[in-house]
Amino acid sequence: MLADALTPKEMPSSGAGTSYAVGHDIVETKKPLAPFSEAAIATAPFVLPRIPFKVNQYWTFQGQFESPTFPVLAFQLVNMDVYGEFVRLLEKVSPNQAGKLPHDIDAAVKTKGVHKLVRDIREIFVSDPSISDRMLEELKRSSSLSADGKRHGLIQSLVKLYGGSKRRYVNYYGPPRTITTIPYYRALQFGESKDSGKPADLKGKAVFVGLSEKLLAERKDSFYTVFSQANGIFISGVEIAATAFSNMLEDTPVKPIDSRYYILMILIWGILIGVLCRMSSIVVGASVMIGLSVIYLVAAEYQFKTNGTWYPIFIPLFLQSPLGFVGAVLWNYVETNKERQHIRKALAYYVPDEVVDQLAKNIVDIKNSGQMVYGACLFADVAGYTTLSEKMSPQQLSDLMHKYFEATFEPVKKHGGLVVNLKGDSFLAIWKAARAEDGLRRQACLAALDVAKAVHRFNGSYENLNLPTRVGVHSGQIFLGNIGAGDHYEYGPTGDTVNTASRMDGLNKYLGTEVLASEEIVQQVDSVLTREVGKFRLKGKAQPIVVHELLGRMEESDEKQKQACAIFAEALGVFRRQAWDEAKEKFHQAIENSGSDGPARFYIRMCEQYKKTPPEISWEGAIPLEEK
């Protein structure tokens, strides 16, 4: 059997040969010289498609007329001894189609020729594609053929060849010359020689004769393949033909999985990698991706070696796996960042932003964190809250207090304060700095005045509701940090400064005032009009504290207010000299001047009390309070 020559052409030839399009080239087949062509049992071309430059496929049948290629004719010729069994098997599944073929192989070759016979068989399978599957099923049930494994395998290969696709992938066995390659001189050698040894044993072998180049300069019939070497040695066309023949003989062609299963596998693999990496940490996700990729690669290699099944490698392992991992990591990052922002936003309602930052960066021990700072504390609570809570449902009370705190928190925030504690009807706000600052004290005092104004506006928006609010302000050293134990902690200040601010708030109910502040916080605050309302020894405190009432911003005060402050200061001086009657008269003048003066009324009562029961001789003007 001889191969037709292939000559490249720019346009299809109109000569006696047949033209084929191969990639972007057009080639023309030419029969061997007449004496050789007539002597050969058959001739056929072996055109290889370059896609785009690498050869990994070959044609079994070509063109509109399903012309067999060289390896197909060779395979049929080598297996003529099973032709009769092949036709009988076809007759069992399709008697009409089998009737188109001669039963005697010698008659078939003489009357039709090998080329025409192979084309006729191919046409039968093309006209009825189900014949292939039915013949394979019948072959499995045939006990006589199953007993002879070799003949059974050859018939099965023939059925798959005629019923399969006209293009097959080449299952290369290795680099160039993996298939035994014998030089011409050894093939023609009849006896043993010193140089070449024993002659080649060709008995029972299928021999393909052709050019097998070793040097780049000799390259005439060689092709670039997956096994091509860097030194320029490619696989020859004759070795590719022998490889294709061997693939048919052993029934081991490379079989890509069906396109439906291919798409399904790609989808499942992508989803699997994406979900597992999405649900895992970066380290675990990377380990899972690598582990699954190794398992997949081993399984794909095993299937390729054993059945020639070609599973996708590049897309799942080199595209989907890294993209799925990176995508999952980015997704996790985005989701984690969203969660972190939500948590930061939620924590910002409870703790300062700087503490949120420390917690987010894990640079603070929540149990032991804290710092000593200079701070101003503002404590405020609602008078008569208990009575109010008895008259309203819990939901109504909650809605009311929500609006109340919205109104009172706004001035604190406006003046740079931070609400750190909220319980029932009261709240605590702080201003902090590394050391004592006039600006800090001024902001706290202004916030206290604005809280009182906000309460007045809030109460004015309701006809039957009134939430009178008392405010106390004090400054000093505080410890600011997390307080608690076990599994519950709260962020806030601790220390005598906080306690004094709370006591200052409670002092309002005795004096009938709204906003009281310690002398510590009002000193050097010139922008606020204040008046001293006395020296008090608050419950639980050993040292007396000088208390001032915050009356308003200095620029908003008039002469009448300032005159009232002077009258009260004069009365307070008389009180401290223990001139009780004169002091009462002065405090009455203060009431007449202002119309309503809670501290003056308080001192009138104290004058009457001390007149009956004078204080100790060592008394320095400090009034003790036994209740909060």
Image: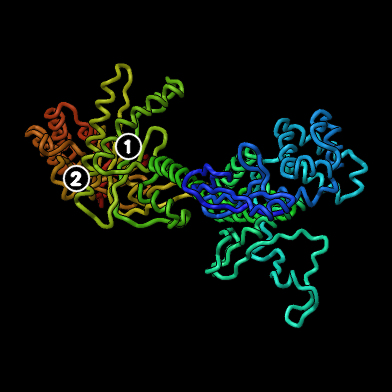
Q: Which mark is residue 576?
A: 2
Label at residue 30: none
Q: In percent of the image, x 58 and y 63: which residue is there?
A: 234
**Left of 204 or right of it: where is 445?**
left
The number of callouts visible is 2
Relative to the observer, which residue lies in front, 208 or 348?
A: 208
Res. 485 in view: no
Instruction: Answer with left or right where residue 247 lies relative to residue 479.
Output: right
What residue sits right under mark 1 in the picture?
A: 380
Position of the C terminus, as image quadrant, is top left
Q: Is residue 481 visible?
A: yes
Which residue is more in the foreground, 612 or 186? 186
In which image quadrant can residue 230 be found? bottom right
Most foreground residue, 158 or 596: 158
Position of residue 447 measured from the top left corner of the image (x, y, whole percent): 24, 39
> Which of 211 and 253 lies nearest the eye of the viewer?
211
Q: Amino acid at mark 2?
A: Arg
Helix, strand or loop at disc 1? strand
**How busy is the neighbourhood of tag 2: few (under 14 within 10 Å), some, or many (20 plus)?**
some
Distance of mark 1 from mark 2, alpha carbons? 30 Å
Q: Residue at x 56, y 59 (%)?
A: 224
